[in-house]
């Protein structure tokens, strides 16, 4: 049976031991282990070359992500969970009265101009393997 084990951020150092070539692995919570090279290479992916699926997982964990191929300086995406806001437009007041305006979760982009807009992925973005975590 195959199981999805999730996405964890680790720090790994390549080393040679009596057991062979592998990696000393340290997890975010401080747990340490050693992994043979082949098992490590099959289980982990470089965070500077993530798939879109991995980028989505990172977004949902509260991290910021961007594509290496994007030209705009300072651009990144982040996850906005579902919430609500007070009506600020005539249309919102007509629809919701004085009640809060509910909205669903979405992905936001911080643009090179310094503002924030809702973001929609292109096919190129979805198929790219150059997603990175932004610190």
Image (tube, rainbow, N blue to C red):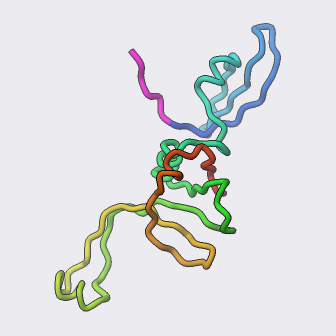
| Residue located at (60% from left, 38% from top) | 29
Image check: 49 left or right of 19?
A: left
Let me know if residue 4 is in the magenta part: yes
**Picture quadrant of residue 111:** bottom right
Q: Position of residue 67 (x, y in %)?
A: 61, 54
Which residue is at the front of the view, 38 or 17? 38
Residue located farthest toward the top when viewing the structure as drawn: 18
Image check: 126 left or right of 112?
A: left
Find the magenta span and give its range.
1-6
**Picture quadrant of residue 118:** bottom left
Q: In the rendered image, which quarter contains the C terminus? A: bottom right
Total numbered labels:
0
In this picture, is 6 found above or below 122?
above
Residue located farthest toward the bottom when viewing the structure as drawn: 90
Q: Position of residue 22 (x, y in %)?
A: 74, 19
Which residue is at the front of the view, 9 or 33? 9
Residue located farthest toward the front when viewing the structure as drawn: 123
In this picture, is 1 found above or below 27?
above
Image check: 12 left or right of 123?
A: right
Magenta segment, prevailing SS (helix, strand or loop): loop
Q: Position of residue 54 (x, y in %)?
A: 52, 42
Q: In the rendered image, which quarter contains the N terminus? A: top left
| Residue located at (66% from left, 55% from top) | 69
Let me know if residue 86 is in the magenta part: no
| Residue located at (21% from left, 88% from top) | 93
Image check: 22 left or right of 77?
A: right
**Picture quadrant of residue 28:** top right
Q: Position of residue 36 (x, y in %)?
A: 69, 16
In this picture, is 75 found above or below 40?
below
| Residue located at (28% from left, 85% from top) | 87
């Amino acid at each position: 049976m195959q199981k999805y084990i999730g996405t964890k951020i680790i720090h790994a150092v390549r080393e040679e031991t009596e057991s062979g070539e592998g990696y000393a692995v340290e997890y975010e919570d401080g747990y340490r282990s050693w992994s043979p090279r082949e098992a490590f290479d099959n289980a982990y992916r470089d965070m500077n070359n993530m798939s879109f699926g991995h980028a989505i997982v990172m977004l949902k964990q509260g991290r910021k992500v961007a594509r290496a191929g994007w030209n705009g300086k300072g651009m990144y995406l982040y996850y906005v969970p579902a919430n609500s806001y007070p009506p600020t437009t005539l249309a919102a007041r007509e629809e919701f009265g004085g009640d809060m305006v509910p909205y669903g979760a979405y992905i936001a982009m911080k643009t090179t101009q310094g503002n924030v807009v809702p973001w929609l992925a292109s096919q190129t973005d979805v198929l790219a393997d150059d997603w990175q975590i932004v610190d």
